[in-house]
Amino acid sequence: MSNKYTIFFVVFISSCSTNSPKSSDEEFIIPEGERTWLAGDHHVHGKYSAKWNLETTPPTPILFGDAHYFTALNAAMAKMHGLDWMVTTDHGGPGHSKLNLEQAYPELLDSRKAIPQVLQFYGMEFDMPSARHGSLIIPKSDKEAEQLYQIESKFNRREVSPNEYLRGTQAFMIKALEHMQAMSPKPILAVNHPARQAPRLNTFTKVTPKKMREWQDAAPNVITGMTAIPGHQAASLNPDGSIDSTAERAEYYGYPTHGGTDQMSAIVGGVWDSFLGEGRKWSVTAVSDSHAHYTEGRTDFWPGEYAKTYVYAKKDYSSVLEAFRAGKVFITTGDLIDSLFVFVSQGERKAQIGESLTNKNSDPLVVTIAFKSPKHKNFNGDSPRVVRVDLIYGEVLIDQKFIEQNINPTTKVVKRFYSKDWKDKQGYKVMTFTLPANTKKGYIRVRGTNLLNELEPEVDQKGENPWGDLWFYSNPVYIK
């Protein structure tokens, strides 16, 4: 592994505010080596997301029924739009496990050979008992096909359609997760579009925070988190690129998204922060949920065209999955950024996204944020600019009252950075902040936007153009 480093020196002037570090200069290091930020998408549908003829016995799959593309075409478009990895996630149906095993998997193997530049994981959109959907990601191995077949045939809710009620309980979901937790290698299950069916703010139906807590308790190495930026972000675009003023962004027909982000993740002090306030490691991701492109009359972007999930990993299957599971992840829309480092340091000790730092003494905790934007235009032909970065801090409370309310009242934006607050360092925008000396057990996370005056992501109106409302989010750095 390479030990080369890019070294930045950020100079602090003693007359600055009390939020400046005590040291006269702070060494800022970004490692350069095998691990880099790799862009991907864990929610991509193809022709095996079938519709079903239920008048035959057994029911007959109608390929290309709900999604239009061959696996290799999805991979080719992922490559064209800057992705390093993706997951095939066709949803199930009656007997779909056999279709996956006998047809979808061989096609994936061919696609891996045709498009080797994109790491292509085998998986499915798991029809979760008692809930909705999650991206099931199978580790690449010589038994990956059998692993997915076993999970889908035994536990997928729609495998026994139209008798889904037989697998429709939370107890059956826990049984499925316990099975996955016992597997070697272990799969990952990330909850998709968790609040899509929510009728109101803080009112949840099929997918609830309580259920998600129980899922992670049953399979802590399998349930990693949820989608913050869901797919179908092109829902408000007509095939010619004009705006459909009647369309809900991301097809959230009940309660809308905020800046394209699911309410469970968008609201400071809300569900995501409630989980983090329990001391959970809980990651958020961004996806396309691609079925067919909006230029063909559907509601989707190509994988990577609009939303990207970045993992800090080497470009191999095991490293990408390890980083995903560990929460070494940031997400973005519209190619607002393509690199993000968030460090919390105390003296010589340092932790970054997905890692933990123990607060051992009275020395200050210094937060250093560095981001970089692509040099090329995005796929709308724009060059969006980050105009604000928010540093968010919350405590770990483990308070049953707040757990039941799905809130964390300690979570706040502790600093808003604007362009005057950051320095240019070899292509990065670099900024720092010193947390108080008495900082308790908690976490920090970062978000940024191209919107100067929208201090919190606002409710998305019908017909909103997704290209004008861009955000990025880091996953947490944990403070013990």
Image (cartoon, helix red, strand yellow):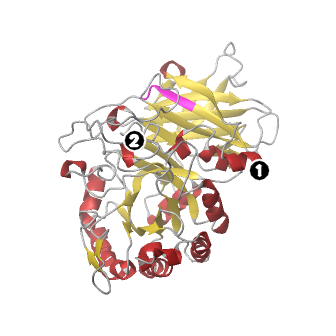
Q: Could you tell me the amino acid type at mark 1?
A: Gln
Residue 82's place in the image compared with 128, above or below, is above
Q: Secondary structure at mark 1?
A: helix
Q: Residues within 10 Å of mark 1 (few under 14, many from 20)?
A: few
Residue at 72 percent across and 45 percent down: it is: 402
Q: Residue 400: which numbered mark, if any?
A: 1
Q: Residue 392: which numbered mark, if any?
A: none
Observer-nearest residue: 22 or 325?
325
Does residue 149 appear in the picture of this structure? yes
- Residue with the most extreme right position: 361
Q: Secondary structure at mark 2?
A: strand
Does residue 5 appear in the picture of this structure? no
Across and down, in percent, residue 452 comes to 45, 23
Across and down, in percent, residue 93 comes to 37, 74
Q: Nearer the viewer, mark 2 or mark 1?
A: 1
Q: Residues within 10 Å of mark 2 (few under 14, many from 20)?
A: many
Q: Could you tell me the amino acid type at mark 2?
A: Thr
Look at mark 2 in the image and give the residue it sits on: 333
**What span is colored magenta in the figure?**
386-390
Across and down, in percent, residue 136 comes to 47, 67
Which of the 4 image quarters holds residue 209? bottom right
